[in-house]
Amino acid sequence: MKPRWLAATVIPVMAGNAIAHGFEERYDLPVPLSYVVVGACAAVFLTFVLAILLIRRPAIPSAGFATRKSLLPKDLRQGLAGLAQALVWLLFALTISSALWGSRDPLMNLAPTMIWIVWWIGISFAVVICGNFWPALDPWRSSFEALDQLARKLGFKQGLARNWPWPAGLDAWPAVFLLLLWSWLEVVYPLASSPLRLGCAALLWTAVNLAGMVCFGPGQWQKNADVFALYFATLGKIAPGASHLEAAAGPGKLQAAAQAGFVTAMLSTVLFDGLHGGMAWTSFEHLLRRFAATAMDINGYFSGTMGLTLVWLAFSIAYLLSSSLSANLIKPSGQSSSGLQLAADFAPSLIPIAAAYNIAHNFSNLLIQGQRIFQLLSDPFGRQWDLFGTARFYPDIAVVDARMTWFVAVLSIVAGHMLSVWMAHRQALRLGLSARRTALITTPLTLLMLACTAISLLVIAEPMVVYTP
Protein backbone atom coordinates (compact mmCIF):
# COMPACT_ATOMS: atom_id res chain seq x y z
CA MET A 1 0.00 0.00 0.00
CA LYS A 2 0.99 3.62 -0.34
CA PRO A 3 2.15 5.09 3.01
CA ARG A 4 -0.19 7.64 4.60
CA TRP A 5 2.60 9.07 6.68
CA LEU A 6 3.92 12.45 5.68
CA ALA A 7 7.29 12.80 4.05
CA ALA A 8 10.07 13.99 6.28
CA THR A 9 11.05 16.37 3.54
CA VAL A 10 7.60 17.97 3.62
CA ILE A 11 7.24 18.15 7.38
CA PRO A 12 5.23 21.36 7.56
CA VAL A 13 2.28 19.82 5.71
CA MET A 14 -0.54 19.29 8.21
CA ALA A 15 -3.65 19.82 6.13
CA GLY A 16 -6.33 17.16 6.08
CA ASN A 17 -4.89 14.72 8.56
CA ALA A 18 -3.68 16.84 11.42
CA ILE A 19 -1.37 14.30 13.01
CA ALA A 20 0.14 12.08 10.40
CA HIS A 21 2.90 9.88 11.62
CA GLY A 22 5.84 9.11 9.46
CA PHE A 23 7.93 9.23 6.37
CA GLU A 24 7.89 8.42 2.72
CA GLU A 25 11.30 7.00 3.50
CA ARG A 26 10.81 3.34 4.44
CA TYR A 27 13.01 1.21 6.66
CA ASP A 28 14.24 -2.11 5.31
CA LEU A 29 13.93 -4.56 8.20
CA PRO A 30 17.03 -6.72 8.80
CA VAL A 31 14.73 -9.65 9.68
CA PRO A 32 11.25 -10.65 8.48
CA LEU A 33 8.43 -8.78 10.18
CA SER A 34 7.00 -12.08 11.41
CA TYR A 35 10.16 -12.55 13.52
CA VAL A 36 9.64 -9.15 15.10
CA VAL A 37 6.00 -9.90 15.90
CA VAL A 38 6.78 -13.34 17.35
CA GLY A 39 9.68 -11.95 19.39
CA ALA A 40 7.52 -9.15 20.77
CA CYS A 41 4.74 -11.56 21.74
CA ALA A 42 7.32 -13.86 23.34
CA ALA A 43 8.61 -10.96 25.47
CA VAL A 44 5.06 -10.15 26.63
CA PHE A 45 4.36 -13.80 27.43
CA LEU A 46 7.65 -14.11 29.32
CA THR A 47 6.61 -11.11 31.42
CA PHE A 48 3.40 -12.97 32.27
CA VAL A 49 5.41 -16.03 33.41
CA LEU A 50 7.83 -13.90 35.44
CA ALA A 51 4.95 -12.05 37.07
CA ILE A 52 3.49 -15.37 38.24
CA LEU A 53 6.85 -16.51 39.60
CA LEU A 54 8.10 -13.28 41.14
CA ILE A 55 5.19 -11.13 42.30
CA ARG A 56 3.80 -12.10 45.68
CA ARG A 57 2.33 -8.81 46.89
CA PRO A 58 -0.55 -6.79 45.45
CA ALA A 59 -0.23 -3.25 44.19
CA ILE A 60 0.08 -0.75 47.02
CA PRO A 61 -1.02 2.82 46.31
CA SER A 62 1.95 5.13 46.40
CA ALA A 63 1.88 8.68 47.60
CA GLY A 64 2.84 9.92 44.17
CA PHE A 65 4.41 13.25 43.36
CA ALA A 66 1.83 15.37 45.13
CA THR A 67 2.96 14.49 48.64
CA ARG A 68 6.69 14.62 48.10
CA LYS A 69 8.47 17.27 50.10
CA SER A 70 9.61 20.11 47.89
CA LEU A 71 13.05 21.65 48.28
CA LEU A 72 11.71 25.05 47.25
CA PRO A 73 10.21 27.53 49.74
CA LYS A 74 6.43 27.76 49.69
CA ASP A 75 6.37 31.38 48.50
CA LEU A 76 8.73 30.57 45.64
CA ARG A 77 6.64 27.55 44.62
CA GLN A 78 3.49 29.64 44.58
CA GLY A 79 5.22 32.37 42.61
CA LEU A 80 6.52 29.91 40.01
CA ALA A 81 3.09 28.26 39.77
CA GLY A 82 1.45 31.64 39.24
CA LEU A 83 4.01 32.56 36.60
CA ALA A 84 3.48 29.25 34.79
CA GLN A 85 -0.28 29.74 34.82
CA ALA A 86 0.05 33.27 33.48
CA LEU A 87 2.37 32.09 30.70
CA VAL A 88 0.02 29.25 29.74
CA TRP A 89 -2.97 31.58 29.72
CA LEU A 90 -1.04 34.04 27.52
CA LEU A 91 -0.18 31.24 25.08
CA PHE A 92 -3.79 30.11 25.19
CA ALA A 93 -5.07 33.58 24.29
CA LEU A 94 -2.41 33.96 21.59
CA THR A 95 -3.32 30.59 20.07
CA ILE A 96 -7.04 31.41 19.93
CA SER A 97 -6.32 34.88 18.52
CA SER A 98 -4.06 33.54 15.80
CA ALA A 99 -6.66 30.91 14.88
CA LEU A 100 -9.41 33.53 14.55
CA TRP A 101 -7.52 36.43 12.99
CA GLY A 102 -4.31 34.97 11.64
CA SER A 103 -3.41 33.48 8.27
CA ARG A 104 -5.84 30.90 6.89
CA ASP A 105 -2.85 28.81 5.82
CA PRO A 106 -2.36 26.14 8.54
CA LEU A 107 1.37 26.09 7.77
CA MET A 108 1.71 29.77 8.61
CA ASN A 109 -0.62 29.89 11.61
CA LEU A 110 0.45 29.15 15.18
CA ALA A 111 -2.78 27.44 16.26
CA PRO A 112 -2.57 24.03 14.51
CA THR A 113 0.99 23.31 15.64
CA MET A 114 0.42 24.66 19.15
CA ILE A 115 -2.79 22.66 19.68
CA TRP A 116 -2.06 19.36 17.94
CA ILE A 117 1.69 19.05 18.47
CA VAL A 118 2.86 21.07 21.47
CA TRP A 119 -0.25 20.69 23.63
CA TRP A 120 -2.00 17.45 22.68
CA ILE A 121 1.09 15.32 21.97
CA GLY A 122 3.68 17.20 24.02
CA ILE A 123 1.67 17.35 27.25
CA SER A 124 0.66 13.69 26.81
CA PHE A 125 4.31 12.63 26.62
CA ALA A 126 5.30 14.90 29.52
CA VAL A 127 2.69 13.66 31.99
CA VAL A 128 3.74 10.06 31.34
CA ILE A 129 7.26 11.03 32.39
CA CYS A 130 6.63 13.66 35.07
CA GLY A 131 3.17 12.90 36.42
CA ASN A 132 -0.02 14.85 35.88
CA PHE A 133 0.95 18.51 36.17
CA TRP A 134 -1.90 19.63 33.89
CA PRO A 135 -4.15 20.87 36.75
CA ALA A 136 -1.47 23.44 37.61
CA LEU A 137 -1.51 24.76 34.03
CA ASP A 138 -5.11 24.19 32.91
CA PRO A 139 -6.22 27.58 31.47
CA TRP A 140 -9.91 26.68 31.72
CA ARG A 141 -9.67 25.79 35.41
CA SER A 142 -7.58 28.88 36.18
CA SER A 143 -10.04 31.06 34.24
CA PHE A 144 -12.94 29.67 36.26
CA GLU A 145 -11.07 30.19 39.53
CA ALA A 146 -10.27 33.80 38.60
CA LEU A 147 -13.92 34.48 37.69
CA ASP A 148 -15.05 32.74 40.87
CA GLN A 149 -12.79 34.95 43.01
CA LEU A 150 -14.07 38.03 41.19
CA ALA A 151 -17.66 36.98 41.85
CA ARG A 152 -16.94 36.55 45.57
CA LYS A 153 -15.37 40.01 45.73
CA LEU A 154 -18.48 41.45 44.07
CA GLY A 155 -20.67 40.04 46.82
CA PHE A 156 -21.59 36.54 45.60
CA LYS A 157 -20.63 34.64 48.74
CA GLN A 158 -21.23 31.22 47.22
CA GLY A 159 -19.12 32.01 44.18
CA LEU A 160 -20.03 30.90 40.67
CA ALA A 161 -20.37 27.14 41.17
CA ARG A 162 -23.96 25.96 41.63
CA ASN A 163 -22.75 22.43 42.56
CA TRP A 164 -25.69 20.59 41.06
CA PRO A 165 -25.47 16.83 41.67
CA TRP A 166 -23.99 14.96 38.75
CA PRO A 167 -26.52 12.52 37.19
CA ALA A 168 -25.51 9.15 38.60
CA GLY A 169 -26.33 7.27 35.40
CA LEU A 170 -23.95 9.39 33.33
CA ASP A 171 -20.77 8.66 35.27
CA ALA A 172 -17.88 9.60 32.95
CA TRP A 173 -19.62 8.63 29.70
CA PRO A 174 -19.64 12.28 28.51
CA ALA A 175 -15.83 12.19 28.64
CA VAL A 176 -15.80 8.92 26.66
CA PHE A 177 -17.99 10.46 23.97
CA LEU A 178 -15.88 13.64 23.85
CA LEU A 179 -12.65 11.64 23.50
CA LEU A 180 -14.10 9.77 20.53
CA LEU A 181 -15.34 13.07 19.10
CA TRP A 182 -11.89 14.64 19.53
CA SER A 183 -10.31 11.72 17.65
CA TRP A 184 -12.93 12.09 14.93
CA LEU A 185 -12.09 15.77 14.57
CA GLU A 186 -8.38 14.92 14.43
CA VAL A 187 -8.49 12.02 11.96
CA VAL A 188 -11.76 12.11 10.01
CA TYR A 189 -12.85 15.75 9.92
CA PRO A 190 -10.09 18.07 8.64
CA LEU A 191 -10.24 20.43 11.61
CA ALA A 192 -6.53 21.26 11.54
CA SER A 193 -6.67 22.33 7.91
CA SER A 194 -8.67 25.40 8.92
CA PRO A 195 -7.27 27.55 11.74
CA LEU A 196 -10.58 29.43 11.88
CA ARG A 197 -12.59 26.27 12.51
CA LEU A 198 -10.01 25.18 15.06
CA GLY A 199 -10.34 28.49 16.86
CA CYS A 200 -14.13 28.32 16.85
CA ALA A 201 -13.97 24.78 18.24
CA ALA A 202 -11.64 26.00 21.02
CA LEU A 203 -14.03 28.84 21.89
CA LEU A 204 -16.98 26.45 21.91
CA TRP A 205 -15.16 24.07 24.27
CA THR A 206 -14.19 27.01 26.48
CA ALA A 207 -17.84 28.02 26.79
CA VAL A 208 -18.97 24.43 27.47
CA ASN A 209 -16.16 23.83 29.97
CA LEU A 210 -16.82 27.00 31.97
CA ALA A 211 -20.58 26.42 31.92
CA GLY A 212 -20.06 22.87 33.18
CA MET A 213 -17.90 24.09 36.06
CA VAL A 214 -20.51 26.70 36.95
CA CYS A 215 -23.35 24.17 36.96
CA PHE A 216 -21.67 21.17 38.61
CA GLY A 217 -18.57 22.61 40.23
CA PRO A 218 -15.03 22.14 38.85
CA GLY A 219 -14.45 18.89 40.77
CA GLN A 220 -17.47 16.98 39.46
CA TRP A 221 -17.21 18.42 35.97
CA GLN A 222 -13.53 17.61 35.47
CA LYS A 223 -13.99 14.14 36.93
CA ASN A 224 -16.80 13.20 34.56
CA ALA A 225 -16.89 15.44 31.49
CA ASP A 226 -13.64 17.40 31.05
CA VAL A 227 -12.08 14.98 28.59
CA PHE A 228 -8.66 16.64 28.58
CA ALA A 229 -8.32 16.83 32.38
CA LEU A 230 -9.38 13.20 32.56
CA TYR A 231 -7.07 12.11 29.74
CA PHE A 232 -3.94 13.69 31.24
CA ALA A 233 -4.84 12.47 34.74
CA THR A 234 -5.20 8.92 33.43
CA LEU A 235 -1.87 8.98 31.61
CA GLY A 236 -0.22 10.51 34.67
CA LYS A 237 -1.01 7.40 36.71
CA ILE A 238 1.84 5.47 35.10
CA ALA A 239 4.49 8.15 35.70
CA PRO A 240 7.40 7.01 37.92
CA GLY A 241 6.33 7.36 41.54
CA ALA A 242 2.66 7.94 40.72
CA SER A 243 -0.17 5.73 41.94
CA HIS A 244 -0.60 3.28 39.07
CA LEU A 245 -3.62 1.27 39.98
CA GLU A 246 -5.57 3.27 42.51
CA ALA A 247 -8.06 5.83 41.28
CA ALA A 248 -7.11 8.86 43.32
CA ALA A 249 -9.54 11.61 44.18
CA GLY A 250 -10.03 14.21 41.50
CA PRO A 251 -10.15 13.93 37.73
CA GLY A 252 -8.58 10.46 37.66
CA LYS A 253 -11.44 8.59 39.35
CA LEU A 254 -14.02 6.90 37.15
CA GLN A 255 -16.86 4.49 37.78
CA ALA A 256 -17.12 0.86 36.65
CA ALA A 257 -18.21 0.69 32.99
CA ALA A 258 -17.25 4.29 32.23
CA GLN A 259 -13.73 3.66 33.54
CA ALA A 260 -13.24 0.73 31.18
CA GLY A 261 -14.89 2.66 28.34
CA PHE A 262 -12.61 5.66 28.70
CA VAL A 263 -9.38 3.66 28.85
CA THR A 264 -10.37 1.49 25.87
CA ALA A 265 -11.22 4.69 24.00
CA MET A 266 -7.69 5.95 24.70
CA LEU A 267 -6.27 2.85 23.01
CA SER A 268 -8.82 2.63 20.22
CA THR A 269 -8.50 6.22 19.03
CA VAL A 270 -4.74 5.92 18.47
CA LEU A 271 -5.14 2.48 16.87
CA PHE A 272 -7.81 3.88 14.57
CA ASP A 273 -5.48 6.71 13.59
CA GLY A 274 -2.93 4.10 12.49
CA LEU A 275 -5.50 2.03 10.61
CA HIS A 276 -7.10 4.98 8.85
CA GLY A 277 -5.89 5.19 5.27
CA GLY A 278 -4.12 1.81 5.31
CA MET A 279 -4.78 -1.32 3.30
CA ALA A 280 -7.26 -2.63 5.86
CA TRP A 281 -9.06 0.71 5.75
CA THR A 282 -9.40 0.54 1.97
CA SER A 283 -10.94 -2.93 2.27
CA PHE A 284 -13.32 -1.63 4.95
CA GLU A 285 -14.50 1.23 2.71
CA HIS A 286 -15.08 -1.19 -0.19
CA LEU A 287 -17.17 -3.37 2.12
CA LEU A 288 -19.22 -0.38 3.25
CA ARG A 289 -19.90 0.60 -0.34
CA ARG A 290 -21.36 -2.84 -1.00
CA PHE A 291 -23.82 -2.68 1.89
CA ALA A 292 -24.36 1.04 2.45
CA ALA A 293 -23.55 2.73 -0.83
CA THR A 294 -26.24 5.38 -0.43
CA ALA A 295 -24.83 6.50 2.91
CA MET A 296 -21.26 6.93 1.66
CA ASP A 297 -19.94 10.44 1.09
CA ILE A 298 -16.99 11.69 -0.89
CA ASN A 299 -15.29 13.13 2.18
CA GLY A 300 -15.28 9.82 4.02
CA TYR A 301 -17.13 11.15 7.05
CA PHE A 302 -19.53 8.22 7.16
CA SER A 303 -16.87 5.56 6.76
CA GLY A 304 -14.61 7.36 9.22
CA THR A 305 -17.36 7.60 11.81
CA MET A 306 -18.26 3.95 11.35
CA GLY A 307 -14.62 2.89 11.49
CA LEU A 308 -13.83 4.80 14.67
CA THR A 309 -16.97 3.51 16.39
CA LEU A 310 -16.34 -0.08 15.33
CA VAL A 311 -12.69 -0.06 16.43
CA TRP A 312 -13.71 1.21 19.87
CA LEU A 313 -16.61 -1.22 20.16
CA ALA A 314 -14.51 -4.16 18.97
CA PHE A 315 -11.76 -3.51 21.50
CA SER A 316 -14.25 -2.79 24.29
CA ILE A 317 -16.19 -5.99 23.60
CA ALA A 318 -12.99 -8.05 23.42
CA TYR A 319 -11.84 -6.56 26.72
CA LEU A 320 -15.22 -7.15 28.38
CA LEU A 321 -15.27 -10.75 27.13
CA SER A 322 -11.82 -11.39 28.55
CA SER A 323 -12.92 -9.88 31.87
CA SER A 324 -16.10 -12.00 31.88
CA LEU A 325 -14.03 -15.12 31.25
CA SER A 326 -11.77 -14.16 34.15
CA ALA A 327 -14.82 -13.68 36.38
CA ASN A 328 -16.04 -17.18 35.48
CA LEU A 329 -12.63 -18.63 36.33
CA ILE A 330 -12.80 -17.37 39.92
CA LYS A 331 -16.46 -18.13 40.65
CA PRO A 332 -15.67 -21.54 42.24
CA SER A 333 -13.53 -19.71 44.81
CA GLY A 334 -16.51 -17.83 46.18
CA GLN A 335 -15.64 -14.49 44.57
CA SER A 336 -18.63 -12.55 43.28
CA SER A 337 -16.90 -10.10 40.95
CA SER A 338 -18.73 -9.60 37.66
CA GLY A 339 -17.04 -9.26 34.31
CA LEU A 340 -17.91 -5.57 34.25
CA GLN A 341 -16.43 -4.99 37.70
CA LEU A 342 -13.24 -6.84 36.75
CA ALA A 343 -13.06 -4.78 33.57
CA ALA A 344 -13.12 -1.65 35.73
CA ASP A 345 -10.59 -3.12 38.17
CA PHE A 346 -8.11 -4.00 35.45
CA ALA A 347 -8.71 -0.92 33.26
CA PRO A 348 -5.76 1.03 34.79
CA SER A 349 -3.44 -1.76 33.66
CA LEU A 350 -4.29 -0.83 30.06
CA ILE A 351 -2.97 2.71 30.48
CA PRO A 352 0.66 1.76 29.63
CA ILE A 353 -0.57 0.38 26.30
CA ALA A 354 -2.41 3.62 25.53
CA ALA A 355 0.75 5.59 26.34
CA ALA A 356 2.85 3.22 24.23
CA TYR A 357 0.56 3.58 21.21
CA ASN A 358 0.70 7.35 21.58
CA ILE A 359 4.50 7.33 21.60
CA ALA A 360 4.72 4.89 18.70
CA HIS A 361 2.43 6.98 16.49
CA ASN A 362 3.55 10.48 17.44
CA PHE A 363 7.23 10.33 18.40
CA SER A 364 8.64 11.50 15.06
CA ASN A 365 5.93 14.08 14.58
CA LEU A 366 6.66 15.70 17.94
CA LEU A 367 10.42 15.84 17.36
CA ILE A 368 10.23 17.20 13.81
CA GLN A 369 6.99 19.13 13.48
CA GLY A 370 7.40 20.36 17.04
CA GLN A 371 10.50 22.32 16.00
CA ARG A 372 8.31 24.64 13.97
CA ILE A 373 6.98 26.20 17.15
CA PHE A 374 10.09 28.39 17.32
CA GLN A 375 9.35 29.80 13.88
CA LEU A 376 5.62 30.21 14.51
CA LEU A 377 6.01 31.98 17.85
CA SER A 378 7.91 34.73 16.03
CA ASP A 379 5.10 35.07 13.48
CA PRO A 380 1.94 33.60 15.07
CA PHE A 381 -0.49 35.32 12.70
CA GLY A 382 1.42 34.65 9.49
CA ARG A 383 2.00 38.38 8.87
CA GLN A 384 5.73 38.16 8.09
CA TRP A 385 6.70 39.21 11.62
CA ASP A 386 9.91 38.21 13.37
CA LEU A 387 9.25 38.95 17.03
CA PHE A 388 12.00 36.76 18.50
CA GLY A 389 14.37 36.47 15.57
CA THR A 390 13.36 32.87 14.85
CA ALA A 391 10.98 33.36 11.94
CA ARG A 392 13.53 31.86 9.56
CA PHE A 393 14.14 28.80 11.72
CA TYR A 394 13.49 25.55 9.87
CA PRO A 395 13.11 22.06 11.38
CA ASP A 396 16.08 19.72 11.31
CA ILE A 397 14.46 16.75 9.58
CA ALA A 398 17.57 14.63 10.09
CA VAL A 399 16.98 14.41 13.84
CA VAL A 400 14.70 11.40 13.26
CA ASP A 401 14.77 8.87 10.43
CA ALA A 402 12.58 5.87 9.62
CA ARG A 403 14.95 3.46 11.38
CA MET A 404 14.85 5.36 14.68
CA THR A 405 11.08 5.80 14.43
CA TRP A 406 10.64 2.06 13.89
CA PHE A 407 12.80 1.08 16.84
CA VAL A 408 11.13 3.60 19.15
CA ALA A 409 7.72 2.33 18.05
CA VAL A 410 8.61 -1.32 18.62
CA LEU A 411 10.26 -0.69 21.99
CA SER A 412 7.37 1.44 23.25
CA ILE A 413 4.72 -1.06 22.14
CA VAL A 414 6.52 -4.05 23.64
CA ALA A 415 7.41 -2.21 26.85
CA GLY A 416 3.85 -0.91 27.20
CA HIS A 417 2.33 -4.39 26.93
CA MET A 418 4.94 -5.86 29.28
CA LEU A 419 4.22 -3.23 31.92
CA SER A 420 0.51 -3.77 31.43
CA VAL A 421 0.83 -7.51 32.09
CA TRP A 422 2.92 -6.83 35.20
CA MET A 423 0.41 -4.28 36.56
CA ALA A 424 -2.55 -6.59 35.82
CA HIS A 425 -0.98 -9.37 37.87
CA ARG A 426 -0.37 -7.07 40.83
CA GLN A 427 -3.95 -5.87 40.57
CA ALA A 428 -5.22 -9.47 40.52
CA LEU A 429 -3.40 -10.22 43.77
CA ARG A 430 -5.59 -7.62 45.50
CA LEU A 431 -8.54 -10.01 45.11
CA GLY A 432 -7.01 -12.32 47.71
CA LEU A 433 -6.86 -15.37 45.46
CA SER A 434 -4.39 -18.23 45.54
CA ALA A 435 -1.34 -18.05 43.26
CA ARG A 436 -2.94 -20.53 40.86
CA ARG A 437 -6.20 -18.63 40.57
CA THR A 438 -4.35 -15.34 40.23
CA ALA A 439 -2.56 -16.78 37.21
CA LEU A 440 -5.87 -18.03 35.82
CA ILE A 441 -7.67 -14.72 36.20
CA THR A 442 -4.99 -12.83 34.29
CA THR A 443 -4.66 -15.39 31.47
CA PRO A 444 -7.57 -14.08 29.31
CA LEU A 445 -6.30 -10.50 29.59
CA THR A 446 -2.77 -11.63 28.73
CA LEU A 447 -4.06 -13.40 25.62
CA LEU A 448 -5.82 -10.17 24.60
CA MET A 449 -2.59 -8.24 25.14
CA LEU A 450 -0.66 -10.71 22.99
CA ALA A 451 -3.18 -10.16 20.19
CA CYS A 452 -2.94 -6.39 20.63
CA THR A 453 0.86 -6.57 20.50
CA ALA A 454 0.77 -8.35 17.14
CA ILE A 455 -1.95 -6.11 15.68
CA SER A 456 -0.32 -2.86 16.79
CA LEU A 457 3.05 -3.88 15.33
CA LEU A 458 1.44 -4.80 12.01
CA VAL A 459 -0.44 -1.50 11.93
CA ILE A 460 2.65 0.55 12.73
CA ALA A 461 4.80 -1.39 10.25
CA GLU A 462 2.54 -1.12 7.20
CA PRO A 463 3.31 2.47 6.18
CA MET A 464 6.84 2.63 7.56
CA VAL A 465 8.90 -0.45 6.79
CA VAL A 466 9.80 -2.64 3.85
CA TYR A 467 9.26 -6.15 5.06
CA THR A 468 8.73 -9.73 4.12
CA PRO A 469 6.28 -12.01 5.93
Image (tube, rainbow, N blue to C red):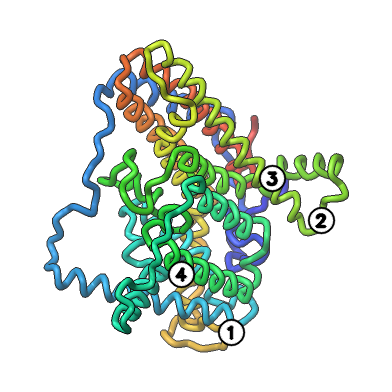
Residue 297's label in the rendered image is: 2
Q: Mark 4 or 1, which is nearer the eye?
A: 4
The residues bearing labels 2 and 1 have C-alpha atoms spaced at a distance of: 31 Å
Residue designated by label 1: 101
Per the image, the residue denoted by label 4 is 210
What percent of the width, then of the height, locates residue 454?
A: 56, 31
Q: Position of residue 4 (x, y in %)?
A: 67, 52
* Residue 408 visible, this angle: no
Residue located farthest toward the top when viewing the structure as drawn: 332
Crowd class of label 4 (few under 14; some 14 to 19; many from 20; radius 10 Å): some
Horizontal and vertical percent position of residue 406: 52, 45
Q: Indicate which disc, 3 or 4, sits on the residue closer to the N terminus.
A: 4
Ranked by sequence position, the earlier of labels 4 and 1 is 1
Q: Which mark is residue 152?
A: none
Q: CA distance from mark 3 to mark 4?
A: 32 Å
Question: Which amino acid, mark 2?
Answer: Asp
Is 25 on the left or on the right of 36, as rendered? right
Can the viewer see residue 258 in this picture? yes
**In this view, 82 is above or below 23:** below
Tell me the mark number nearer the camera, choosing from 2 and 4. Answer: 4
The first of marks 2 and 3 along the sequence is 2
Q: Tell me the amino acid under the disc marked 4.
A: Leu
- In whole angstroms, how far apart are the C-alphas of marks 4 and 1? 23 Å
Q: Secondary structure at mark 2?
A: loop
Which of the 4 quarters of the picture holds residue 185?
Answer: bottom right
Disc 3 marks a residue whose amino acid type is Gly
Category of crowding for the residue at label 3, using alpha-carbon neighbours closer than 10 angstroms: few (below 14), some (14–19), many (at least 20): many
Residue 69 against residue 90 in the figure, above or below: above
**Circle 3 sits in a helix, a strand or a loop, which is it?**
helix
